[in-house]
Amino acid sequence: MGPGQYFEPRPRVASRRSTVTLALPDMTLTLATDRGVFAQSAVDPGTRLLLLEAPAPPPAGHFLDLGCGYGPIACALARRAPEATVWAVDVNERAVALCAENAVANSAAGVRAAAPDDVPDDVRFELIWSNPPIRVGKAALHDLLLRWLERLTPGGRAVLVVQKHLGADSLAAWLVDRGWSVERVRSRQAYRILRVTPAPTGT
């Protein structure tokens, strides 16, 4: 049996924990990580770029870190908006447990680490930040994004970071075709940062 993928619910590889440091201008996070989760050896460059370049979050509300991994985005969001509830969602059980642990260790009290089906159906999000799991495949990625984008509040926004060579521009075009408004916020270090909002109705 192969090592599996980070987007599987139960990693097939044995646990071998380690620690990574994420230094940002406004905080430094020390994050426990493990085999079988995304970017286990270092915070992904796309995630780091999102945390450096994305527009500031609102001061409060319900936020979503979609595909949270061990929690760098969720923890940073909760520290930047301490009045917010940050839902950190991942199918990977090991990642969710690490995210919850890292939230406690980094004084990110607003984080709620959960499996996707454990987020209450009535929760709507003012903000979604995500380094989405592109490697799950196009169909699965599209289903994932549509599921959660539909839960944005009318004035809400999603901010996604996607590598150019992994289809950032085609993903943006697909979202526009599905009725979303997409703005390229940044293009740097082989990544695009995309802001996705509900398209205005009427003309």
Image: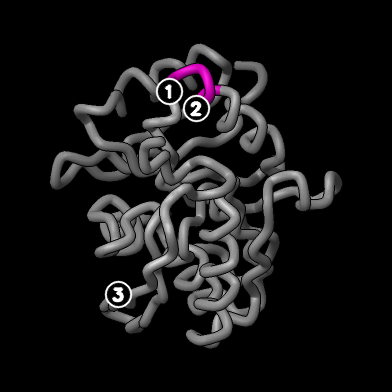
Query: Could you tell me which quadrant the C terminus lies in?
Result: top right
Q: Which mark is residue 122?
A: none
Is residue 66 left or right of 136 when viewed as pictured?
right
Quadrant for residue 165, please give it. Answer: top left
Q: Is residue 159 visible?
A: yes
Q: Earlier in the sequence, mark 3 or mark 2?
A: 3
Residue 155 belongs to the span the image colors magenta: no
Kind of element beneath mark 3? strand
**SS category of the residue bearing label 1:** loop
The answer to whether the residue labelled 3 contacts the one labelled 1, judged by CB atoms less than 8 Å apart, is no
Secondary structure under the numbered disc 2 in the rendered image: helix
Q: Residue at x 39, y 76 (%)?
A: 31
Residue 46 to residue 16: above or below: above
Q: Badge 2: how crowded within 10 Å, few (<14), some, or many (20+)?
A: some
Tag 2: residue type?
Answer: Leu
Which circle, 3 or 2, is nearer the viewer?
3
Left or right? Give the position of 201 relative to 175: right
Residue drawn at (55%, 44%), measured in percent from left and top? 157
Label 1: few (<14), some (14–19) or many (≥20) C-alpha neighbours in 10 Å? few
| Residue toward you, 3 or 79 | 3
| Residue for point 69% across, 60% down | 62
Which residues fall within the magenta stretch? Answer: 138-142
Residue 161 in the image, given as x and y percentages of width and height: 35, 43
- Residue 24: tell me if it is visible: no
- Whole-percent x, y for residue 152 in the image: 67, 42
- Residue that badge 3 annotates: 20
Q: Is residue 140 magenta?
A: yes
**Image disc number at residue 141:** 2
Quarter location, residue 111: bottom right
Task: Determine which of the numbered discs, if any, sits on residue 137 in the image.
Answer: 1
What residue lies at 58% left-to-right and 45% top-to-bottom? 9
